[in-house]
Image: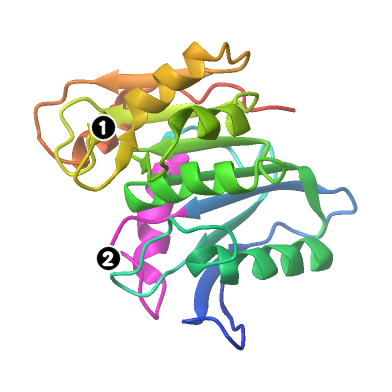
Amino acid sequence: FERLRYCLGDAAYTLPFALFSPKKTKEKIPLLIYLHGYTNGGESNLIPFFEALPIIFRTKINIRKQPAFILIPSLPRFEGFPSKEGEGFDKIFTPLFEKLISEYPIDEKRVYIMGASNGGMGSWTQLGIHPERYAAAIPMMGCIHDSDISVYCEKIKDKPIWAVHAADDMAVGIGENKEFGSFGSDIIVDGLKKIGSKNFPSSYTLKFIAVNSSQGTIEILKELAGVPSLGA
């Protein structure tokens, strides 16, 4: 892994990130993006790195059998991943993404995004803003802030998704939160089912853990045998 930083003149902040690059390859290979939990960012980007690796490998993603680039951006503490197109995280991440695509042998048809808690929100949000960018997603304990759930679901209905959420998660609920205007995994899944999504749920892991926190989703991952196919 390399620890790098992306700067954009009029952005609100710079973006440290860790990038894993496999040994030189002539073929284009996938890119996996991991978005960290709230307050787990920082200038050193070490916390997102150590958060990401156990989660990535618990999903049985094997970068030895399937070489891939891994990108782990690090937000300033108390900043969030959810944003509108061209604002906040999306404003600085989109040009970084385009730069990496132009400089590395990344297969644009195999870009995958995953994240936990605030990163799960960011995964849902990025999928809605840029459905053409991502081949599939693994949003964990996430939600979306969108005024119209049906419009959102229409944008992502054909995407393979593995949604993971603890049923008793008190930090990021699985249902509707009217106070914050957010919709959890249950609402998104139901919305996709209602519009007849072909590829969803590729998998939806929902379970009572009785820990009353986002940590329950991590406990779910420990029990899973593997990740479903997310595309060729």
Which structural element holds mark 1?
A: strand
Residue situated in front as seen by the camera: 125 or 138: 125
Q: Which residue is mark 2?
A: 39
* Label pair 1/2, CB-CB below 8 angstroms: no
* Label 1 packing within 10 angstroms: few (<14), some (14-19), many (20+): some
**Is residue 89 located in the magenta-colored stretch of the structure?**
no
The picture places residue 97, in percent across and down from the top left corner, at: 68, 63
Q: Is residue 201 left or right of residue 63?
A: left
Residue placed at 37% from the left, 62% from the top? 80
* Discs 1/2, front: 1
Quarter of the rendering occupied by the C terminus: top right
Where 76 sits versus 193, above or below? below
Q: Amino acid at mark 2?
A: Thr
Q: Is residue 118 left or right of residue 56?
A: left
Quarter of the rendering occupied by the N terminus: bottom right
Residue farthest to the front? 147
Residue placed at 62% from the left, 28% from the top? 159
Which stretch appears magenta?
Answer: 35-57
The picture places residue 122, in percent across and down from the top left corner, at: 45, 51
Q: CA distance from mark 1 to mark 2?
A: 23 Å
Residue placed at 47% from the left, 82% from the top? 13
Q: Is residue 72 left or right of residue 112?
A: left
Where 35 sits versus 5, above or below? above
Q: Which residue is mark 1?
A: 176
